[in-house]
Image (cartoon, coloured by chain):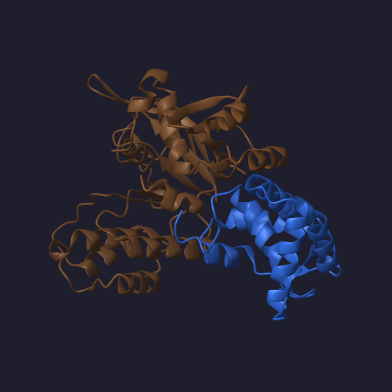
């Protein structure tokens, strides 16, 4: 599906829109109290049906991450960022650590070696000699 | 919400040929619906009947609450843009003026900005337009009409990918500003997929699929990787298609994939790829034909 401004084929589109918005909020791109793009704005940006975009916004509103201000639009709720970051931390093991261990096992890298590799990469990133 | 279009048991015969065979469907007001199917499936016949340009052999058709045929009140609230639209021998600006008389909500500013996007001059004779420019004129009329029911029948013959993107963008923008009911027939399915709220697939004159577009995504998944792993992963699940090459296999599996499934697939070293709308439609077009011909069916 070309030209969709980065939405991929995995899962329903509305869920992907919700995920993108959640990512923006967690990353601080959308601050608490800030106005969230409208369904029409999101539809134009992602080149998707406005009803699909609205459904994505509603997913976050139902979770209390967005709040509606009558006649103005949707805004990021207070505490939304903390909630999302807590969720991401909880998912970190499943999304990153487990796959890492799976691939390591496949390559015959044991846990000690893996930890050493992580230390090594981490120090390189900081520019510190190992 | 009352449907903008409601069709029940619609059949259309041409001598001994059946173009539409007991079609029943509704299109909700204010939605964009994709009308999909192979060439000759009956999409154009259906759209022409909805636009009152052709008569049903039997069955009932309601557009905006009334039968469209010879119904002036319905027809002025409706526009049909055809792939092979034929225009009388006059200039672009004349075609726009004629359209402005037919459609009460006509927006002349939108029309000229669209023509400008497509580089079509208003003073040019329609005969002298390229195929793509003629399509651009059709799209311009279809959007600028701002008709409550807007029907597009493969509106972009001769338009390249960039020009088609202009059409999608302008359609979405104008739809957002002036909501209406849009039915768009296309065989560029994956390209247009994200525009649709609902999808209707017609196959050999019958409705093969009529569903919300969101529900279709993730309805089936291709599982690929080592044969043994693929087999153990897909064991006991409905499967549409299976292909193998040496020690690798690729299986199309029906049904939603859970988080646990993903975890399992990862540990087995399998790739999971959701089927695109186009692939699903190819399947849907095969369903009503029976399993035997499934493998032979491809898009024309």
Number of callouts in the render?
0
Residue B18, above or below A104: above
Residue B161, above or below B229: below
In the rendered structure, the answer to whether residue A80 lies left or right of residue B35 reads right
In the rendered structure, the answer to whether residue B147 lies left or right of residue B156 reads right
x and y percentages locating residue A113 in the rendered image = 73, 57
Q: Nearer the viewer, residue A64 or A103?
A: A103
x and y percentages locating residue B89 in the rendered image = 13, 60
Locate the N terminus of chain B by quadrant: top right
Q: Nearer the viewer, residue A64 or B205?
A: A64
In the rendered structure, the answer to whether residue B97 lies left or right of residue B36 reads left
Q: Residue at x 39, y 62 (%)?
A: B165
State the image quarter where residue A125 is shown: bottom right
Q: Nearer the viewer, residue B213 or A23?
A: A23
Asked if residue A100 shows in the view, the reply is: yes
State the image quarter where residue A124 is shown: bottom right
The colour applied to the residues of chain A in this rendering is: blue
x and y percentages locating residue A19 in the rendered image = 68, 58
Asked if residue B77 shows in the view, the reply is: no
x and y percentages locating residue A39 in the rendered image = 62, 62
Locate the C terminus of chain B by quadrant: top left
The colour applied to the residues of chain B in this rendering is: brown
Q: Residue at x 40, y 33 (%)?
A: B202
Residue B117, above or below B38: below
């Amino acid at each position: 599906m070309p030209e969709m401004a980065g939405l991929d084929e995995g899962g329903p589109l509305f869920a992907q829109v919700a995920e993108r918005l959640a990512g923006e909020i967690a990353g601080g791109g959308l601050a608490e109290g800030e106005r969230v793009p409208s369904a029409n704005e999101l539809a134009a940006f992602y080149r998707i049906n406005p009803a699909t975009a609205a459904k994505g916004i509603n997913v976050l509103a139902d979770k209390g991450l967005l709040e509606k201000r009558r006649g103005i639009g949707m805004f990021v709720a207070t505490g939304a960022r903390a909630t999302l970051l807590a969720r991401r931390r909880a998912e970190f093991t499943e999304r990153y650590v487990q796959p890492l261990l799976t691939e390591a096992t496949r390559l015959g890298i044991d846990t000690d070696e893996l930890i050493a590799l992580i230390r090594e990469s981490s120090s390189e990133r900081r520019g510190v000699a190992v | 919400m009352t449907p903008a279009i409601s069709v029940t048991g619609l059949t259309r015969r041409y001598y001994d040929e059946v173009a539409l065979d007991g079609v029943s469907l509704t299109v909700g007001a204010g939605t964009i619906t994709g009308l999909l199917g192979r060439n000759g499936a009956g999409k154009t016949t259906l759209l022409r009947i909805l636009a009152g340009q052709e008569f049903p052999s039997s069955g009932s058709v309601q557009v905006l609450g009334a039968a469209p045929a010879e119904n002036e009140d319905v027809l002025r609230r409706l526009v049909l843009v055809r792939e092979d639209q034929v225009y009388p021998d006059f200039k672009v600006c004349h075609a726009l003026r004629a359209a402005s008389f037919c459609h009460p909500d006509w927006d002349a500013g939108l029309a000229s900005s669209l023509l400008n996007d497509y580089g079509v001059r208003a003073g040019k004779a329609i005969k002298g337009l390229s195929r793509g420019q003629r399509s651009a004129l059709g799209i311009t009329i279809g959007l600028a009409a701002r008709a409550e029911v807007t029907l597009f029948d493969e509106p972009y013959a001769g338009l390249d990918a960039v020009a088609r993107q202009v059409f999608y963008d302008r359609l979405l923008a104008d739809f957002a500003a002036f909501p209406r009911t849009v039915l768009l027939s296309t065989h560029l399915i994956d390209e247009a997929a994200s525009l649709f709220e609902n999808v209707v697939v017609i196959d050999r004159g019958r409705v093969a699929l009529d569903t919300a577009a969101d529900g279709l995504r993730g309805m089936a998944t291709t599982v690929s990787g080592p044969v043994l792993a693929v087999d153990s992963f897909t064991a006991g699940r409905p499967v549409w298609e299976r292909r193998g090459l040496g020690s690798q296999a690729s299986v199309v599996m029906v049904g939603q994939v859970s988080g646990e499934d993903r975890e399992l697939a990862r540990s087995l070293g399998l790739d999971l790829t959701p089927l695109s709308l186009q692939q699903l439609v190819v399947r849907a077009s095969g369903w009503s034909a029976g399993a035997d011909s499934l493998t032979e069916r491809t898009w024309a």
